[in-house]
Amino acid sequence: MPAESPGWRPSLARSIVLRHDRVRDADLLLMPERAVLLNVEAGHILRLCDGHRTVAEIVAHLAETFPGAPVAEDVPEFLDRVRGEGWVR
Amino acid sequence: MTEAPWALLAEVTHACPLHCPYCSNPLELVRRRTELTTAEWSRVLAEAADLGVVQAHVSGGEPLLHADLAEIVAAAHAAGIYTQLVTSGLGLEAGRLDELVRAGLDAVQLSVQDSRAEGSDRIAGRPSFAAKERAAGVIRRAGLPFGLNVVLHRHNLDHIAEIIELGVRWGADRIELANTQFYGWALRNRTALLPTREQLESAKDTVVTWRERLGGRPELIWVVPDYYEGVAKPCMGGWGARSITVGPDGAALPCPAAYALPDLSPPNVRDHSLAWIWARSAAFNAYRGTAWMPTPCRECPRREIDFGGCRCQAYALTGDAARTDPACALSPDHRLVRDPATTASRGGPEQNLTYRRPARNG
């Protein structure tokens, strides 16, 4: 389901754990053979992928938290990309 | 300052029901009476997390032979570490896996030795294929991320398509096709295990075809065979760069094969903190970075890509761990891998397998 699809409520894939790494002071995605270091923006977006919020709701939430940021374009694009990696579904 | 480590390989016991002739455990297996206690493992895992470790591979031997495995997994989970069980599958009943999942286990890697029972049991040195098939079902039903690991060599490379089909049938999320690394037990069995160049080329093509066909589910990982490539592998992502191995007796090493390096005198978690071991110990600094490198590594544009290759392979083949990995075509010792590979490709002599001896309780 692409990000434009209004019904999509992104959630992390079953094998993925999102956690804050206090040593590196960064968010990480952990999976069986990999650890992915996230930038601050990616961490914010993925923390909202709870399977309840739609993409529009995630965008709205981030637009409120980060006024002026180009979230309307960047967030759906990012979500499509990480879905392609199999990290969100 | 030394960068933080990412991963811990916890070899909780060397005891194992299998006898694979390429076992990655050392030739001198640690006896059970000298194994770390569960309390010691809990401390090590907490220290590892404080140091920056975010992933633990709980392995062995066969980790399921450790009675307190769930407690060890719980300690890793409590420390915030993503924890994967690395198992032969023998003893992985539904109740046992449930207990581990409740303790916080995140993923399982199961080994199988070939695509069919006969070949798999022959390499494992005992009937085990049926138990592995049952274990795969148990992992699937638990819904855990499931990796299937197959060590490849002369006797199973021609079955690569069947091996991939097996992984699909068993429901694996990823299939790790790991060409044998020749040190320790595998080096002892090199003549019997070394494939021909033709076998490898054909298997590689099959993997490419299947990767397209499967579209990433399951994911196929091809671990390159360094005897034929002429380039050294970036072993462990560099010495003391990413990972710590802790053996059953608490010996801490930059790589599981480094037990074999006689002058390394590995520090022990019973004597030192993991932080000291990582940053300060002579063993973890011995081949860290590039300052230790000999010619031709020192001037090589790949020195920060492959880090001079594998120290354990350099030692095993040349007797000097500080030489360039002979797998590299630029190594003055390259004939030490080229000659056996050439012999193997000509059909080579036959050799009986020397099976890993079981760890004796004691």
Image (cartoon, coloured by chain):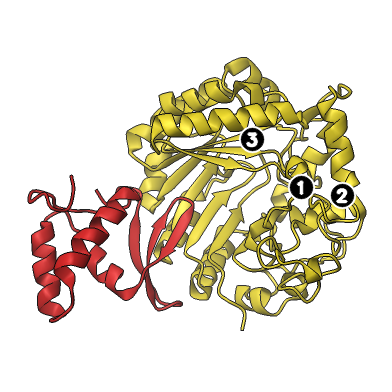
Chain colours: A red, B yellow
Pair 3/1: label in front? 1
Chain letter behind tag 1: B
Q: Distance between the residues labelled 1 and 2?
A: 8 Å
**Residue at image point 52% right, 50% down:** B68
Rendered location of residue B282, percent (x, y): 77, 75
Residue B82 placement: quadrant: bottom left
Vertical relation: B284 (above or below) B27: below
Vertical relation: B128 (above or below) B273: above
Question: Circle 2 sits on which residue?
Answer: B334
Question: Circle 1 sits on which residue?
Answer: B230
Looking at the image, residue B351 sits to the left or right of residue B89; the answer is: right
Amino acid type of the residue tagged 3 in the rendering: Val
Q: Which of B323 and B89 is in front in this view?
A: B323
Helix, strand or loop under label 1? loop
Tell me if mark 2 has few (under 14), some (14-19) or many (20+) residues whose alpha carbon lies within 10 angstroms of its own. Answer: some
Q: Pointers 3 and 1 in contact (CB under 8 A)?
A: no
Looking at the image, residue B149 sits to the left or right of residue B140; the answer is: right
Looking at the image, residue A40 sits to the left or right of residue B15; the answer is: left
Q: Pointers 1 and 2 in contact (CB under 8 A)?
A: yes
The residue sitting at the bottom extreme is B1
Tell me if mark 1 has few (under 14), some (14-19) or many (20+) residues whose alpha carbon lies within 10 angstroms of its own. Answer: some
The residue sitting at the top extreme is B118
**Residue at image point 68% right, 31% down:** B200
- Can residue B189 be seen by looking at this rendering? no
- Can residue B300 be seen by looking at this rendering? yes
Question: Circle 3 sits on which residue?
Answer: B151
Amino acid type of the residue tagged 2 in the rendering: His
Which labelled disc corresponds to residue A75? none
Rendered location of residue B9, percent (x, y): 59, 56
